[in-house]
Image (cartoon, helix red, strand yellow):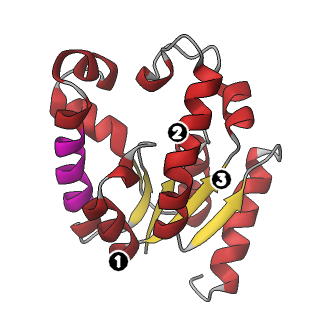
Amino acid sequence: MRLALIGLPGSGKTTVGRQLARRLQLAFLDTDQVLEQRLGCSIRDFFANEGESRFRDIEEQVIDELTLAPEGGVLSTGGGVVLRAPNRSHLHERSHVIYLRSTPEEVYRRVRHDQNRPLLQVEDPMQRLRELFAVRDPLYQETAHFIIETGRPSLATVVNMIVMQLELAGLL
């Protein structure tokens, strides 16, 4: 089984993904970590030096490879993965996609002090999150098989909600 988590930067994809993988006894892979290994530098530095478009080209190759890999597992994706149509189709067709839906306000509360998020290193990060949400929320919804409203529940509660959805869908 391959599960993929999508959502805004800071929506909890990596944290939830690790716990979900542990709970389901599946491998865990963070696509951002795979990308940084491939790039040989941080995503933030790559963005600054090469630009977002070049980054998205490489991200598209990585998503294609990871969703074709014979072994399953839990993939935590980057927040902008849905901006490219091939990524949306590869994720949707080759995995069970879970959208961790968080409001811009919830995300801001979680990540306001994180300096490693290139898209949030702007004068008004709250406004930036609202803009990202407006553009990406329809794309996340289009890509997802399941939508989990993250709100303020604990990590364990979010993982339980996902497991329950997978059970209801007959996947577990």
Side (left or right) of 99 relative to 90: right
Residue tagged 2? 132
Distance (Cα) linking label 3 and label 2:
13 Å
Is residue 61 a member of the stretch shown in magenta? Answer: yes
Q: Residue at x 27, y 23 (%)?
A: 47
Looking at the picture, how far across and down is residue 29, in whole percent?
38, 49
Say which amino acid is labelled 1. Answer: Glu
Q: Residue furthest right?
A: 153
Q: Quadrant of residue 166?
A: bottom right
Side (left or right) of 9 relative to 100: left
Looking at the picture, how far across and down is residue 100, in whole percent?
62, 54
Say which amino acid is labelled 2. Answer: Leu
Q: Nearer the viewer, mark 3 or mark 2?
A: 2
Distance (Cα) linking label 1 and label 3:
20 Å
Residue tagged 1? 93
Q: Is residue 153 above or below residue 124?
A: below
Region of the chain picked out in magenta, as a range: 56-66
Q: Residue at x 24, y 42 (%)?
A: 56
Side (left or right) of 115 relative to 50: right
Few, some or many residues within 10 Å of mark 1 (<14, 14–19, 20+): few
| Number of the label disc, if any, that sits on residue 101 | 3
Quadrant (top left/top right/bottom left/bottom right) for the N terminus: bottom left
> Disc count in the image?
3
Distance (Cα) linking label 1 and label 2:
24 Å
Side (left or right) of 164 relative to 123: right
SS at mark 3?
strand
Looking at the picture, how far across and down is residue 98, in whole percent?
56, 64
Q: Residue at x 59, y 16 (%)?
A: 124
Asked if the residue under mark 3 is in contact with the one under mark 1, i.e. CB atoms within 8 Å, the reply is: no
